[in-house]
Amino acid sequence: MKVLVIGAGNMGLTYAKGMSKSKLLKKENIMVLDTSEEKLDEVDQMSDFDAYRNLEDCVPQADIIFIAVKPYHAEDLFRKINKLVTGDQLLISIMAGITIKTIKDTTGLTKIIRAMPNLPAQVGKGLTSYVASPEVSRIELLAIESLLDTTGKSILVKDENFIDASTGISGSGPAYVFYFMQSMMEAALQMGFSPNVSKVLVAQTFTGAIELFNQNTLSPNSWMEKVASKGGTTRAALNSMEDNNVGELIKEAAFAAFDRAVELGKEKQHV
Ligand SMILES: NC(=O)C1=CN([C@@H]2O[C@H](COP(=O)(O)OP(=O)(O)OC[C@H]3O[C@@H](n4cnc5c(N)ncnc54)[C@H](O)[C@@H]3O)[C@@H](O)[C@H]2O)C=CC1
Ligand SMILES: O=C(O)[C@@H]1CCC=N1
């Protein structure tokens, strides 16, 4: 089996590296294509994968084509791919918003996996939600699942609406966590801690809280109650968040990402 990763950016290279650890694939069977010379140099220097500049040289050889370019590059890329594919190839897209129908209509391929990973895939802690077109067989789906699992956990969702929804939760979600971290670090700096100490205070607090959450069945609300003493400091902070409607604003933000994913799928420039 040969896999071609198109787009050697944050996610493309992460997946190429992840998949190279899969039992289903040999490293030498992973090809990587990018249009940026800088990226191609990076791939060459890693000397793990063969780097390609031209679609003609690698698309026909690929059993699986993994698309990891930005959504606004999809239209042009799909038009070029269309002329090179054979009906039997399977295409995995991780692009936000771009629908299976658009991919089918523009590439001429029918076996499509639409997936939504997230950045922690870089450290093997990613979450990828995915859905398949009916033309993908059960055996193919199992193989894909095992490839996706090389970067963390994967979840097969019911339909594409859940891919857009998971974009609002897990796909974009790491940025919300970093947003929260940034604010806490800024507060620590304002309290007089050095940048290094601020970083440790915040990072260890997040790590510790996540470990607690993962080792137990308690809800975040229950954990909050364990931290907060009556009339104490945590209650003062939580009251401040409640007064400022922070919880509702976070939900609104997640829905803004969800809505944007749906919108991206409808934008004319992609079809
Ligand atoms: N960064 C993230 O946290 C996540 C990104 N995604 C999706 O992954 C996709 C890629 O995102 P990133 O890796 O962050 O972007 P990136 O900008 O890091 O990488 C994109 C790469 O595609 C290359 N490229 C552009 N046009 C090309 C073409 N026609 N042929 C070949 N290569 C081309 C660029 O040179 C670049 O190296 C996006 O569609 C995004 O929606 C999905 C989940 C999470
Ligand atoms: O911001 C974006 O559009 C992509 C999809 C999820 C994370 N990054």
Image (spheres, rainbow, N blue to C red):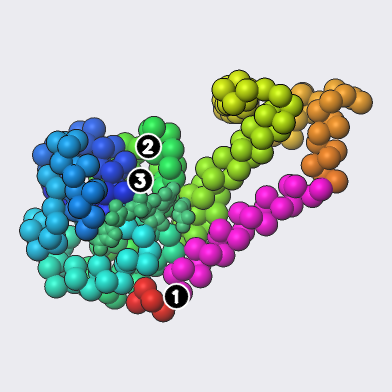
Residue at the extreme right of the image, as rendered: 231
Lower sequence index among marks 2 and 3: 3
Seen from the viewer's position, the closer of residues 255 and 114 is 255
User: Residue, x 11% and y 39% (percent of image)?
Assistant: 28
Q: Mark 2 touching mark 3, by CB under 8 A?
A: yes
Q: In this view, does 65 lie above or below 201?
A: below
Residue placed under numbered mark 3 in the picture: 10
Q: Can residue 162 be seen by looking at this rendering?
A: no
Q: Where is residue 162 in the image (x, y as percent from the top left)?
A: 50, 57
Residue 270 higher or lower than 202, as above or below: below
Q: Is mark 2 on a helix, strand or loop?
A: helix
Q: Give the range drawn in magenta.
A: 244-266
- Residue for badge 2: 122
Q: Which of marks 3 and 1 is in front?
A: 3
- Magenta stretch: residue 251 in it? yes
Would residue 1 be counted in the magenta stretch? no
* Residue 221, position as x, y percentages in the image: 74, 35
Front residue of 228 and 143: 228
Mark 3 or 1 closer to N-term? 3
Q: What residue type is labelled 2?
A: Gln
> Residue 267: which numbered mark, if any?
1
Report the mark closest to the observer, 2 or 3: 3
User: Gap in Å between the C-alphas at discs 2 and 3?
Assistant: 8 Å
| Measured Cα–Cα span from mark 3 to mark 1 | 24 Å
Q: How crowded is mark 1: few (under 14 residues within 10 Å), some or many (20 or more)?
A: few
Disc 1 element: loop
Q: Is mark 3 within 8 Å of ligand 1?
A: yes
